[in-house]
Amino acid sequence: MNITSKRRFVGFKMFIIYFVSMTISIMVMGYLSYHKAQEIIQLNVGGVALQTVQQANKRLEMIFEEYENRSYFVFSYRELQRGILGGFGDNYERIQNTDQINKFLSSFANLKNDTANVFVFGENTASYTYSLTSNPTFTMMSPALSSQREQDWYKQIKEADGRMVWFGIRPSFMPEKHVTDEDQPVFCYGRALKDIWGNGEIIGILLIEINPNEIRQILSEIDFKARGKAIIVDRANNVVADADGESAEHPFHLEPAEEERSGIINQVIDGEKMVVVHDRMATSGWKLIGMAPARELVKDSNEIRLYTFYLALGFTLVAVLLSWIISRLMHQPVQILLQSMRKAKEGDFESQIGHHRKDEFGILFDSFNLMVSRIKSLINELYIQRLLKKENQLKMLASQINAHFIYNTLDSIHWISRIYKVDDISTMIFGLSNYLRISLSDGRDMVSVREAVSLVESYLSVQKVRYQDKFEVNVEVDNDLLDKQVLKFVYQPLVENAIYHGIENKRGKGRLDIRWVRKDELLYFEVLDDGVGITPEKLKQIKEALEDNDFTQEEHFALKNINSQIKLAYGEPYGLELESRLAGGTKVTLIFPYR
């Protein structure tokens, strides 16, 4: 027996399935165990990293609070407000005021050796600047120019209405006001100045630029000993400070929601998985973010990975052995069943399995014996159904081809009768052509209830011309059923039967009620006539014919065909029901599922 034949056996396939499934399970468990261990290590390392960031954040908060406290000195200095507002008695008084402001700003700037520039932009009389970037320089200027007031930073400070506005580490907003390298970054912040001894209105703005070395030193210390780095981002996720200036003023998207105070996440940055820890700064609302490559933080997990690999390899070998044993136990009963099925395949439906077992294979053997005993009778029934289906398809195709020609011809006759004003012929031809048009419906077996109603009404328009006042028609349709899809060719024959066999043989005028209604989860098509009715013997004969699947008899063929179509389309619980009494009319009902 060659290898290809062996591959066809269930035993071999089960060996492969068990082997593959168990191997995959072991590999998945090993993989998950390794990654869980890596996750725990990473979480612990991340916790330490978060503590480092939080400690650095506290140091930065102290620096920011100290910066804010410095601004209060300028905000509350009365002589500075006098200089901005003006209103001096003479020039001497102005000179004295300017000298005092010079001394104040000099003391303010030299309070700590990190101040680079101090700008006071007054909006009334004067502005002042004090720079320490080169030689200490004090300058008194005219009030803030309109071009300065239109700058975004100026508007932000003014709109803050006295609250602190932080800009972070960036190039100076006023490089032309001091002698320095324009690319040398500074830490900028500011606030609006108010007339605190007057009406409290804004009289200018204060802009302070600080040497960023202290902030950068703190950020450079956050590296987690794993090639990490730290940045500060504002509320718009733009980098406002970093240790080396490479990320300044660039956007940085942080995945957690804005309301999170602090946390640890894994995030892919520039194609590399990073452990990112963040903590919100209370003073500015910014976030201090520290990050480092995840693989650098979890180097210790490599030993766990190697141990997990050897463990998975050992379990895989055990899986191979167990798979081989199980496949051998399954091979023999499957071969017995296979041999019996080959006999059935060759047409021997008398074949029976004589082995008796008390497991699932025993149930399978008994089921096979029962199957082959019934399959022969089912073959005949299935064969007949297929022949009928093929015959119906051929008849439908032929009727559609003829109907296209007839439809076009009738349409031409309709317009000719309209020209010659032969109204009865025009009405009949129009109804008939509309009936054919809906019947064609692109070869579809299903139509909407709306189209089915139109189909019946087109047929009735022809019959009304023929019978004149012989009967009246009442059509009722639930509006919520109009778009439901139903079978196409099962309604007109029932209406036709009601007219020909019920109303036509009645003396006097008849009535025909046609309804499409929904009751619970069922859809009913009802045709009621007040015609001559059906005798009890005839009614019994028709009902028996509906239950009979013999289509070789032509009697009641239309009703049997309709009933069969419904059961084939929707199932055995649905179909056609018939009620009648002699001289009391007839009611025919089609029952569909409401889907």
Image: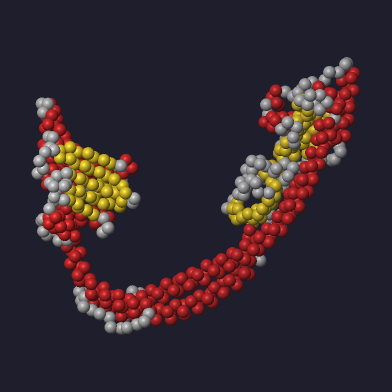
Marks counted in the figure total 0
- Whether residue 2 appears in this view of the structure is no
Instruction: Give x and y (percent) for residue 61.
Output: 77, 45
The residue nearer to you, when weighing 130 against 501, is: 501
Q: Residue at x 57, y 74 (%)?
A: 310
Q: Residue at x 11, y 45 (%)?
A: 500
From the viewer's perspective, is 350 left or right of 225? Answer: left
Say if 439 sits above or below 394 in the image: above
Q: Residue at x 36, y 82 (%)?
A: 358
From the viewer's perspective, is 182 left or right of 546? Answer: right
Instruction: Give x and y (percent) for residue 153.
Output: 69, 32
Snapshot quadrant of residue 447? top left
Q: Residue at x 75, y 46 (%)?
A: 216
Quadrant location of the N terminus in the rendered image: bottom left
Color scheme of the displayed model: secondary structure
The residue nearer to you, when weighing 14 against 366, is: 366
